Amino acid sequence: MKGKIRYNIAEEETYNDGQIIFKETSPGDWVYVILSGSVEILKNVQDRKVIIEKLQPGEVFGELGFIGGIKRTATARAIGETTLGIIDRGFLEKEYNQLSGQFRSILEIIVLRFKKMLDRTCDITRRTDQRYPKVLSLVYKDRKAFVQAYTENASAGGFFIKTEKPLTPGHRFLLKLELSGIPGPLQIKCDVIWAREQDENRPAQEPGMGVKFREISKKDYQLLKKYIAAGEQEG
C-alpha cells in the first residue's frame, strides 16, 4: 500500500463551515492540500451552484490554475472547520520547471481540455430533453438502504429527485420507477450529475439531485417519454 504523500507546506489556513476558499472565475493559482475537515467543489449551472465533488483530508485542489494559468473553474467551500495547507510555490515551480518543455505543454493541453469538457458537461445539463413539472414515485438504493422519493420535474433523459440527503455527484445507482397504469416498475441505471443540499439562506430552493439515465431499455424509454408527454397534454 502506498504511503501518504508529504507536501512542502508554506503556510496553513483555517476556514469555518460554509466559508468560501475561492470563487469560480476568480484569479489565483495557489495549490491547496486538505489537512483536516473537507471541501466541496461547486459549479454554476443555470444560475445555481451545484456540488460536483467533495474532497477529504489528503486531497489536493487548485492545481488547474497553477498548471494551466487559467481562472478558477469552480468554487471551493469549506465543510465544517477545515484546515488547508498552501503548498510551497517555490517548490512547485522548481519541480515543474524541471520537466521538459514538451511534457509541460502536454500537461497544459490536458488542463485546457479538461476545462472545456467541464464547461461542455455543464452546458449539456442545460440542453437535455424537455423537462416537465411532474411528480413520479420512485425507489432507489443509496449506500445503506432503499429510499422512497419523488421527482420534482422529469424528462425522458433524467429527473430532479427531491431528497434531503442527495448522493454524491458521479455516483451510479439503480432507480425503480412506478408509473400509474403500467404494471411493474421501470428499472433505470442512473448517474448523479449534480447535488444540492438544504441552504438556510435559500429556503425556497429544495434539496435534491439531478440524475441522468445511463442505461434504460428502448421499450422503457418509449413508455416513459409517452407517459410524460401525455401527462403534460392532459394538464
Image (spheres, rainbow, N blue to C red):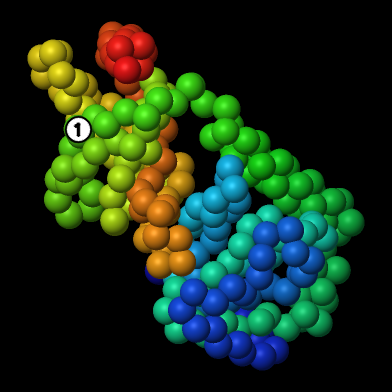
Residue 123 image-quadrant placement: top right
- Left-right relation of 66 to 23: right
Point out the image quarter for the C terminus: top left
Query: For this view, does 202 lie left or right of residue 11?
Result: left
Whether residue 35 appears in this view of the structure is: no
Q: Residue furthest left?
A: 183
Q: Residue at x 14, y 50 (%)?
A: 145
Residue type pointed to by label 1: Ser
Residue shown at 61% from the left, 62% from the top? 75
Quadrant holding the N terminus: bottom left
Q: How far across and how far down the image is residue 80, in percent? A: 42, 79
Towards the viewer: 160 or 59:
160
Task: Kindly identify the residue that appears in the image at 66 percent across and 70 percent down.
Answer: 22
Q: Residue 155: horizontal and vertical position, in percent?
A: 40, 24
- In depth, the one of 53 and 178 nearer the eye is 178
Dividing the picture into quarters, in which one does residue 91 lie? bottom right
Location of mark 1 (residue): 137
Residue in the picture at 85% in, 68% down? 97
